[in-house]
Amino acid sequence: MAWAPCPGRAGLTCATVTVPEDYRRPAGPALSIAVDRLAAIGGPARGVLLVNPGGPGESGTLLLPVLAGALPAAVRASFDVVGFDPRGTGASAPLRCGPAPARVTSALPVPTRPGDPLPGTPVFAEVARDCTAAHPTETPAVGSIAVARDMDRIRQALGVPAISFYGLSYGTVLGAVYARLFPGRVRTMVLDGAVDVNATLGAQAAEQAPAAERALHHLLAACPSLPRCTLGPDPVGAYRHLLATLTAHPLPAPGGGDPTPVTSGDLDTAALAEAVARDRIVVVGMKQNPVVKEARKALAEAGLTYTYLEYGSYFSQWKPRLAIKLWSGWPTFPQVFVRGQLVGGNADVRKLIAAGELKQLLEAP
C-alpha cells in the first residue's frame, strides 16, 4: 500500500486498495477502497486493528479518530488502527443516489406503537429503488459478503497474516461474516453491540430503545453541572417540551440544499449520537470553507485534539440541522461542540481558547 499523509487530517495516513467489483469475476471491473491509518503511539506496532463503526455504510475513515479515541491506551500503543469506507460509500466508489441524509435523520428512530413498522422504512425502500435504477450493475455488488472480502484484500495489502477487528453495531455483522469466510485470518475480534440479522429493523430498534433512554437521562442529568447547560435547571422537562413542540410544529427546512423540515426525529437522532460522542471536541463543517479552516487551525495551535466531521455525512447531518435552527445567533459553519454543547464558530473559537473556556469545559466532571 502506498501510504501518504491525509490532506488536512493531522496524524492520519491514507491509501487505497483495489478490489474486484464482483468477486465472481476477479478480472472484471475494479473498485478503489479508501483506507486510513493511525499509527501506534510510542513505537512499532504489534499488529493491525481494523475497525468499522457500523451504519450500515458509515464512513470508517471519517470516524476513525472517534473510534481510536475510545480505545484503551494500551491498545493504541500496540496497534496501528485502520479504518475504511465500505464499497459504495464515502470515498470508496460511492453510489450517489437516494434521498438526502436528512430524510433519514428526520424520521423517528422507533415506532410510536409496538408492532408498527420502523418509521424510516419508506425512506430505506426509496433508497433501494433509486440506487437500483441509477446504478443497475453496481448496486448488486454492494453487500456484507463483498465488504468482508474487501476486508481480506485490505489485510493482504497490509502484509499481515491475520488481523484484529473491532466492529460496532452493524460492524459486528461484517466481523461475523469475515470470521465465517476467513476463520484462519482472525487474530482477535471484538464485536460490540451485536446485531441480530434475523430480527426486523423495527424489532432491533425496539430492543435498543431502553438502553438509549437510560443513556439520554444520564446525559441530561449531567447537564446542570456543566458551565454551559443551555437546557436550564430541568433538562428533562426542557427536552420533553422541545420534543412535543417539534412533533406538533416541525421547524422549516434549514435550506442550503437541505429541503427537509427539522422534526422530533432529528432531535432523537441528535440525542442518541450525543450520548455516545459527548466527551470530545467535534467540529462540523465544509472543509473548503475558510472559517472552518480557521477554527481547526486555532484548535491545532492550542494543542487541543478534536474530531472533524464534514457536513453532509450521515453521522454529522443532525448536528448542523439542529444547530442552525435551535441555537440562534451562531453562524452556520463551522459548528464547534465540546462535550455535547455548541460552544462557538468562526472567530469565537480563538476567543474561547484565549478565555480558557474550552479547557474548562473539557475538565468539567
Image: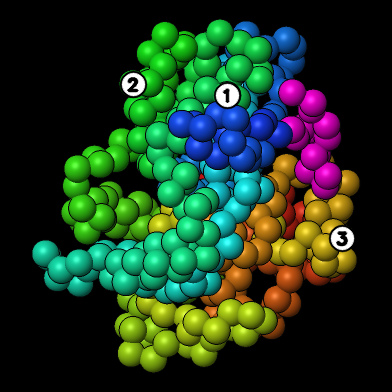
Q: Is residue 190 or residue 338 the one in the foreground?
A: 190
| Residue 235 x %, y % | 40, 69
* Amino acid type for the residue under numbered disc 2: Arg
| Residue 129 x %, y % | 40, 67
Residue lying at the far left of the rendered structure? 115
- Which color scheme does this rendered protein use? rainbow
| Residue 5 x %, y % | 83, 35
* Amino acid type for the residue under numbered disc 1: Arg
12 within the magenta span: yes
Q: In the image, is residue 286 above or below residue 280?
A: below
Of mark 2 and mark 3, the one earlier in the sequence is: 2
Give the residue drawn at x 80%, y 39%. Answer: 6
Q: Which residue is under mark 2?
A: 180
How many residues crowd around disc 2 within 10 Å: few (fewer than 14), some, or many (20 or more)? few
SS at badge 3: helix
Q: What separation in Å lies between label 1 and label 3 (alpha carbons)? A: 38 Å
How many residues crowd around disc 3 within 10 Å: few (fewer than 14), some, or many (20 or more)? some
SS at badge 2: helix
Q: Is residue 7 left or right of residue 316?
A: right
Q: Is residue 17 or residue 270 the one in the foreground?
A: 17
The stretch in magenta equals: 1-15
Of mark 1 and mark 2, the one earlier in the sequence is: 1
Q: What separation in Å lies between label 1 and label 2 (alpha carbons)? A: 16 Å
Give the residue drawn at x 46%, y 46%. Answer: 142
Q: What separation in Å lies between label 2 and label 3 (alpha carbons)? A: 47 Å
Dividing the picture into quadrants, the one containing residue 220 is bottom left
**CB contact under 8 Å: marks 2 and 3:** no
* Amino acid type for the residue under numbered disc 3: Glu
Q: Which residue is under mark 3?
A: 294
265 within the magenta span: no
Q: Which residue is under mark 1?
A: 153
Give the residue drawn at x 69%, y 52%. Answer: 308
